[in-house]
Image: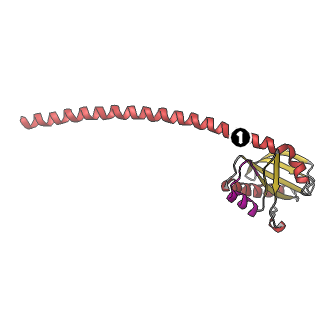
């Protein structure tokens, strides 16, 4: 009987330990759930703030776009933003600013602080725009630009190397930097 009593004592101890472990796990799960909820709220607020900064950059850039590009020899007659949804061909993209005339289209990506991924995504967007234009018989030349409030030198150099015009703050408005070698200006 002594062995049986020892076994029951061990089972009771383990049952008690398992119960404590289960309660501890439930408390930890509740803390994780609360932390996750707070993180989601913080991310939502941060996203709204980031969007507001992006809007501020867009409002800073948009009013003078046509005039600034006129100084570079472009005569754009339309300025707007565009969303393309072509389900039949699987082309979906949004353009922050689109300048147009009968010969050329300038698609501008506007970010608070553009990074390499933003620039690469804009290259993909330009390819989608070209494909969409070809499907519609639009033979105009498509050009690209990247606008931002803050540029690191590496992003600035990368954007220019990819053949994009760059728009960045300068005094009360912004300046446009074009690739130094006109042959580097990329056309789609």
Q: Position of residue 132 (x, y in %)?
A: 80, 54
**Quadrant assignment for the N terminus:** top left
Residue 168 or 17: which is nearer the viewer? 168
Q: Magenta segment, principal secondary structure?
A: helix
Q: Give the crowd class for mark 1: few <14, some 14-19, many >=20 residues within 10 Å.
A: some
Q: Is residue 43 left or right of residue 27?
A: right
180 lies above or below 52: below
Question: From this viewpoint, which residue is outermost toward the front?
Answer: 171
Q: Position of residue 127 (x, y in %)?
A: 76, 58
Q: Quadrant of residue 153?
A: bottom right
Residue 152 part of the magenta segment: yes
Question: From this viewpoint, which residue is outermost toward the left?
Answer: 1
Q: Position of residue 86 (x, y in %)?
A: 77, 49
95 lies above or below 181: above
- Under circle 1, the secondary element is helix
Q: Which residues are magenta?
A: 147-161
The residue at the point 67 percent across, 56 percent down is 116
- Can you identify the residue that label 1 sits on? 53
Can residue 87 be seen from the camera position used here? no
Q: Is residue 7 left or right of residue 115?
A: left
**Quadrant assignment for the C terminus:** bottom right
Residue 153 or 178: which is nearer the viewer? 153
């Amino acid at each position: 009987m002594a062995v049986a009593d020892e076994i029951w004592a061990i089972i009771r101890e383990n049952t008690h330990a398992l119960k404590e472990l289960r309660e501890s796990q439930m408390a930890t799960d509740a803390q994780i759930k609360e932390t996750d909820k707070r993180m989601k709220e913080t991310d939502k607020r941060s996203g709204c703030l980031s969007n507001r900064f992006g809007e501020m950059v867009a409002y800073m850039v948009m009013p003078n776009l046509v005039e600034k590009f006129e100084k570079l020899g472009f005569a754009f007659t339309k300025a707007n933003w565009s969303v393309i949804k072509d389900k039949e061909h699987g082309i979906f993209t949004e353009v922050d600013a689109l300048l147009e005339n009968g010969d050329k289209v300038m698609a501008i990506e506007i970010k608070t602080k553009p990074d390499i991924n933003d620039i690469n995504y804009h290259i993909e967007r330009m390819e989608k725009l070209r494909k969409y234009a070809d499907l519609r018989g639009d033979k105009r030349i498509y050009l690209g630009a990247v606008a931002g409030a803050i540029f690191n030198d590496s992003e600035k150099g990368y954007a220019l190397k990819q053949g994009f015009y760059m728009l960045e703050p300068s005094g009360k408005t912004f300046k446009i930097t074009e690739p130094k070698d006109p042959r580097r200006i990329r056309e789609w």
